[in-house]
Image (cartoon, grey):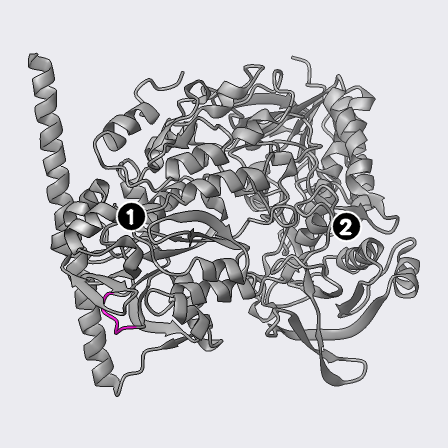
Amino acid sequence: MAKPRSVLVIGGGVAGIQAALDLADIGLQVHLIEQKPAIGGRMAQLDKTFPTNDCAICILSPKMADCARHPNITVHTLAEVREVTGQAGDFSVLVHRQARYVKESECTACGLCLQKCPTKVADEFEMGLQKRGAIYQYYPQGVPAAVAIDREHCLRLTKGRCGICERVCQRGAVDYADKDAELVLSVGAIVVATGFDPFDPTVLRQYGYGKYRNIITALEYERLISASGPTGGHLLRLSDRQPAKRLAFIQCVGSRDVHSNRYCSSVCCMYATKEAILANEHDSEVRSTVFYTDLRAAGRGFQEYIARAQREYGVSYRRGRVAEVAENEQERPVVWYEDTLAGRPASEVVDLVVLAVSLVPRRGATALASTLGVELDDCAFIKTDPLSPTDTTRPGVFACGFCRGPCDIPESVAQASGAAARAAQVVLGGVAVPSRIAEQG
Amino acid sequence: MQDVSIKTFADLQQEVVQAGLCGKCGGCVSFCSAGQLHALEPDEQGFPRYSDESRCLKCGICYLICPVTSDLEAELQQKFARELPAGGRMVITSARSTDPEVRQVATDGGVVTALLLYMLDRRLIDGAIVSRRTGLFSRVPLIATTREEIIAAAGSHFSGSSHLERLGEQYTTYTPTISAVRGLAGNRLSRVALVGTPCQVNTIRKMQCLSILPADVITYTLGLFCWENFAFTAETLQNRLGVDLDDIAKINIKDELIVVLNSGRTLHVPLAQVDDLARPACLACGEFANDYADLSFGGLGSPQGYTTVLIRAPKGQRLYTEALRQGYIEELAFSDASQMRSEKTKMMAKVVAFTQRKRERGRVRKAELAAAAASVDQGGSSG
């Protein structure tokens, strides 16, 4: 039997999308699997990207559209890998696909059902800052452009009541009888691009997250300042919805800390700078302070970006580690910190605190690694080698993007192309290419 | 593939409205309006009816969330931890508003009004579902969003007002389509406090069990003790109490019906004497102390000018403690700890006694209604 000329890409974020496109353009069949109802990943949640201030969704959308219409790419949403057997050049992968309860081929994402669904639950894409129905579109620009039913909350599926979406759908797209499916894919190589989750700062009690309403994480901030986000791009305090004029960005929350994550998440100094710039672009009265441990601007144009933030956008950088965030009578956060340059304790009262939380491997990444039979490093990122940075410990399985360690968007995309090239070698070479890192081991 | 056995508004009409059990809480209509289905409306008396039957999608949710039906009982208990004898985990206390203006208009100590003002001042809520007095027995439901509106709504009311319907309308006004929902900016009503009777809190809690609108905007539930709501008319007042409607200044229910006249005279009427004037549905209801609310309030057990407060959920505890700390309310002073203990024990005993009386009355009344319905059925089938 001929070896399969196809590749499995796990994760539909920007890295997985890029890997899929490169492989498909070479002429290989690609199965792109994504656990959410739409591809796009974390980048789709971002407002802008540093250091160019490009609109994230605007530069990502064309790639997503290319994925959707590429004849060589099959996108499997709501899917996850359950089992992998075989070896490089000839893997057999068992994929579990959760029922969508909506026929993708019929749904036009017109939104009628979304208006009529009586259920209101926290919207994960919007970081819980707004609510969505039990039938929902993961986000408006999502690919595929089809809604899905959340079976945990749908009253038709949990209680046998309601059924409103089926009745209002003009296309007959709603299908409550949809079932989960298992598919077996034969692929020559696997590319892992599962990305990151933000670290939950609730456990770091000194920052007051979860206790005070005007303390948010950076990803929540991205949704808050996004024109398609819950406030329509207005930067408001969560407590009273008044415009936030004074911002504090606290760096290294859960990073570079022996009690949580030892490593540097690498993108936070730059995204905090970007977020502070955006606030000032939205409202020129806004002033921001970035409380940093060390300012890390190692990348093309990064140092200049920081200089511009200081010069043109009213951003101050203060070297100091924050000891505690409290709150005053007006629900304004009070940042207590040690100014480590001046060597004295100080405090600052602001309207909104943004925590630059550590970025950690996606939930389930460890289980996936064991399913794939690849090793992790001591921070739970996929283990790779400096001179073959996209090879995992298992021949034929490659990794790119944040799942193999902190990196920004351009680097994720570059790694994706690298991983795609390595995967293509395995499939097109006709013989299994042993993993370089495994050879060394 | 809809399950044919699901109960819809037709069943609700038969089992609840026609059976005389509808307390006119307005839950079903508020859901139907908030969901933009617009199949239901209140009739002249406040009972739900079809406004346009063709718009009914037979979703069955109105039936599910009715405080009288019991399909969600298990979930309700699990989620909101109802416990005997008088509702969930609680602390009992007696307090009053520190604001003379509030105390002036309040039925008891004005604690509910004080807490609403506190929440509004601190922007914990965008508004509160209350009802504004337009006459002694007439009230107009409204969502109060200012201090003035909240004070205008102070004072309890025993004529019953289906003020939840208003929420349904307003919900649609403020959140017309999903694409326009801007939970934080555009939608000014995303955090609302409900002041309500047990049936109203019950229907909201059922909606919250299902995570459905419009209950998603209800962030605090302030429950009122509820013995019954009366359907007084000028005629019954004259016949029963020998007073003229125009002479009445204020009405209160504690362990008796208290009618304060404009002349300053106060009538004390045993409840048993006016039970038959209560709305029939109230007689079949078994809930007195608003078991599912975050906090419950009433005059029962407290001295004149004070409100008895039952603190239930941790959220209710935080609210009460903060309002106390910030001087919106003050607690009844006791001479010492032992007096406090003995007074609170007495207060609690009263609340529990009323809870048990109402539960028993409801049980008996429900049994009577069921027996009556059964005999009607039998008559029908034999004829």
Q: Quadrant where the N terminus of chain B lies?
A: top left
* Residue tagged 1: B77
Query: Closer to the camera, A65 or A247?
Result: A247
**Is B266 left or right of B170, judged from the image as shown?**
left
Query: Closer to the camera, A228 or B144?
Result: B144
Which is the main secondary structure of the residues drawn in magenta? loop
Q: Quadrant of residue B263?
A: bottom left
Q: Quadrant of residue A426?
A: top right
* Residue tagged 2: A407
Query: Residue drawn 20% across and 51% down?
Result: B238
Question: Which residues, given as a range, are shown in magenta?
Answer: B300-304
As drawn, A92 above or below A192 = above
Query: Residue drawn 22% across and 67% down?
Result: B266
**Is A411 left or right of A191, judged from the image as shown?**
right
* Chain letter for mark 1: B
Which residue ends up furthest to the bottom in the rendered image? B335
**Is B181 left or right of B344, judged from the image as shown?**
right
As drawn, A229 above or below B346 = above
Q: Where residue B354 sits in the image (x, y, percent)?
A: 17, 59
Q: Quadrant of residue A280?
A: bottom right
Density class for disc 1 (Cα within 10 Å; few <14, some 14-19, many ≥20) is some
Magenta run includes residue B303 = yes
User: How far is disc 1 from disc 2 in space, using C-alphas?
Assistant: 48 Å
* Chain letter for mark 2: A
Q: Where residue B72 sits in the image (x, y, percent)?
A: 31, 39
Q: Where residue A319 sits in the image (x, y, percent)?
A: 79, 74
As drawn, B245 above or below A212 = above
Q: Where residue A32 sits in the image (x, y, percent)?
A: 67, 28
Q: Amino acid at mark 1?
A: Gln
